[in-house]
Amino acid sequence: MESCLAHDLAGIGDIIYCEIVQGIRSKHERDQVSNLLLSLPRYDLVGFKIAEKAADNYRLLRSKGITIRKTIDVIIATFCAENEFPLIHNDRDFSLSAPVIGFQEY
C-alpha cells in the first residue's frame, strides 16, 4: 500500500495563506500554522490572466443575481476552475458560485 501524504491531497494558495495567518495573534501559534501550511504545495493564485477571468466571473455571477461578498473568493474560485482543482471550503459564496463558474467543491 502506498503512503498517502497530505501534500498529495491538498495545496495552499498565496492569498488563502494570507487570510489564514493574518488572523493569528500569537507568534508561536502563527509560526506553527505557517510551518504546517507551507509544507503543502504552494500556488500563486492571481496574475493578470486569473484577474481578468475573475472579473468576468464576478460580472457573470452578478448577472445571475449572485453577489459574492469578497473579491478574493471570486479569485480563488476562478483559479480552481481554470486549473481544475477541487476546492475544500465552508463558505456559502463558494457553494453559490461553483455551478456557475464550474469548479468542484468539497
Image: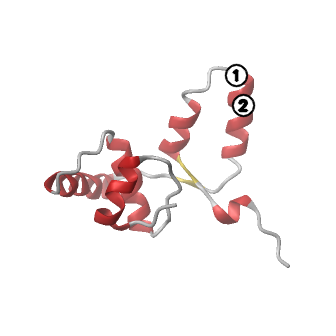
Q: Residue 86, position in %: x, y?
A: 50, 64
Q: Is the residue marked by circle 2 packed among few (<14), some (14-19), or many (20+) residues within 10 Å? A: few
Q: Quadrant of residue 54?
A: bottom left
User: Residue at point 35% right, 67% down?
Assistant: 102
- Viewer-proximal residue among 44 and 2: 2
Q: Which mark is residue 40?
A: none
- Name the residue at the bottom extreme: 1
Alpha carbons under labels 1 and 2: distance apart? 6 Å
Looking at numbered disc 1 in the image, what kind of residue is underneath it? Answer: Lys
Q: Position of residue 26 (x, y in %)?
A: 68, 20
Residue 51 lies, with reference to residue 80, above or below; the image says above
- Residue at 22% of width from left, 55% of height from top? 61
Relative vertical location of residue 13 with respect to residue 106 in this rendering, above or below: above
Q: Residue furthest left?
A: 63
Q: Position of residue 18 (x, y in %)?
A: 52, 36
Expressed as whole percent of the image width and height from the top left, the position of residue 97 reads 32, 57
For the residue marked with disc 2, what is the amino acid?
Asp
Helix, strand or loop for disc 2: helix
Q: Are marks 1 and 2 in contact (CB under 8 Å)?
A: yes
Residue shown at 18% from the left, 53% from the top? 59
Mark linked to residue 27: 1
Q: Residues within 10 Å of mark 1 (few under 14, many from 20)?
A: few
At numbered mark 1, what does the secondary structure look like: helix, strand or loop?
Answer: helix
45 or 60: nearer the eye? 60
Left or right: 102, with 106 as reference point: left
Give me the residue at 17% from left, 51% from top. 65
- Reading the image, the residue beneath label 2 is 31
Picture quadrant of residue 64 = bottom left
Q: In the figure, 30 relative to 69: above or below?
A: above
